Image: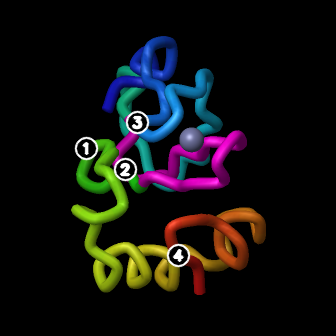
Amino acid sequence: MKKTLLDILMCPIDKYFPLECFELDWKENNIIEQGILYCKKCNRFYPIIDEIPIMLPDEFRSEETEKKFLRNNKKRLPSKIINNARPWHI
Ligand SMILES: [Zn+2]
């Protein structure tokens, strides 16, 4: 996703804005390839995978895929996300 999207993205659950962004991989032209968006109001994280921010309600999220994503990036993300975020952590 383009970094400029951060100027408009809000949490789909509570509409909180702005979201914190933790970049894991990126390329030129301000494109984030992998990362995490974080809502400090409801303590939810949303992964950015293959440039796509995945911002779905909890019931449509994939626990298996997202926990794998967290495990793979455990050392590069803050503990508030790895150990404590909703809807799940590791
Ligand atoms: Zn929220």
- Give the number of the disc on residue 88: 4
Mark 3 vs ligand 1: CB under 8 Å? yes
Q: Nearer the viewer, residue 67 or 35?
A: 67
Q: Counting residues from the N terminus, which is met first, the one under dot 1 or under dot 4?
A: 1
Instruction: Give the colour scheme shown.
Output: rainbow
Q: Counting residues from the N terminus, which is met first, the one under dot 2 or under dot 4?
A: 2
Counting from the top left corner in percent of width and height, residue 84 is at 71, 72
Residue 12 location, quadrant? top left
| Circles 2 and 3 in contact, beta carbons < 8 Å | no
Q: Counting residues from the N terminus, which is met first, the one under dot 1 or under dot 3?
A: 3
Q: CA distance from mark 3 to mark 4?
A: 16 Å
Residue, disc 1: 52
Q: Which residues are magenta?
A: 32-46
Magenta span includes 44: yes
**Main SS type for the magenta part?**
strand
Residue, disc 2: 48
Other-residue count near label 1 (Cα within 10 Å), few / some / many at <14 / 14–19 / ≥20: some
Residue, disc 3: 12
